[in-house]
């Protein structure tokens, strides 16, 4: 286990995760940070800061932009276009 993993696990525990769940979440956060670094050219610090913001806001019930929920638009997900045929 790395110091980074220990810190991520501790954060997840503070946010209310069970110990086994916190360990899984910590590994997933580290893995997703690696993916963001490769895909977006971010530093590890940028990737982790982004993910930790999402995790802490999510635990407080704040949805990221575009994920607010609510009723989907008409015809969403049914394969139909909103344009008349």
Image (spheres, helix red, strand yellow):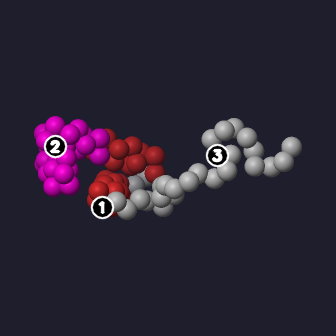
Q: Residue at x 29, y 46 (%)?
A: 29
Can you see residue 49?
A: no
Q: Taken as a whole, is the magenta stretch helix, strand or loop?
A: helix
The label on residue 60 is 1
Per the image, is 31 magenta? Answer: no
Residue at which label 2 appears = 18
Work out whether 26 lies above or below 49: above
Distance from Cα at disc 2 to Cα at disc 1: 17 Å
Q: Residue at x 16, y 43 (%)?
A: 18
Query: In the rendered view, does 73 fall on the left or right side of 14?
Result: right
Residue marked by disc 3: 76
Q: Is residue 67 visible?
A: yes
SS label for mark 1: loop
Residue 85 image offset from top left, x and y in percent: 86, 43
Residue 68, numbered label: none
Q: Is-magenta flag for residue 16?
A: yes
Q: CA distance from mark 2 to mark 3?
A: 36 Å
Q: Secondary structure at mark 2?
A: loop
For marks 2 and 1, the one nearer the N-term is: 2
Quarter holding the N terminus?
top left
Q: Find numbered disc 3 in the image and state the secondary structure of the residue it sits on.
A: loop
Where is residue 6? Give x, y as percent. Answer: 13, 47
Tell me the crowding category of disc 1: few under 14, some 14 to 19, or many 20 or more residues within 10 angstroms, Cα based.
few
Q: Which residues are magenta?
A: 1-29
Measured in 3D between alpha carbons, the distance from the residue under mark 3 to the one under mark 1, in whole angstroms, is 28 Å
Q: Is residue 74 left or right of residue 8?
A: right
Q: Quadrant of residue 35?
A: top left
Mark 2 crowdedness (10 Å alpha carbons): few <14, some 14-19, many ≥20: few
């Amino acid at each position: 286990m790395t110091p980074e993993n220990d810190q991520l696990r501790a954060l997840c525990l503070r946010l209310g995760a069970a110990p086994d769940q916190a360990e899984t979440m910590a590994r997933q956060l580290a893995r997703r940070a690696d993916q963001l670094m490769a895909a977006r050219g971010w530093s590890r610090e940028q990737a982790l800061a982004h993910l930790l913001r999402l995790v802490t806001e999510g635990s407080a019930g704040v949805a990221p932009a575009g994920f607010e929920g609510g009723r989907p638009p008409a015809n969403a997900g049914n394969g139909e276009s909103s344009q008349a045929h």
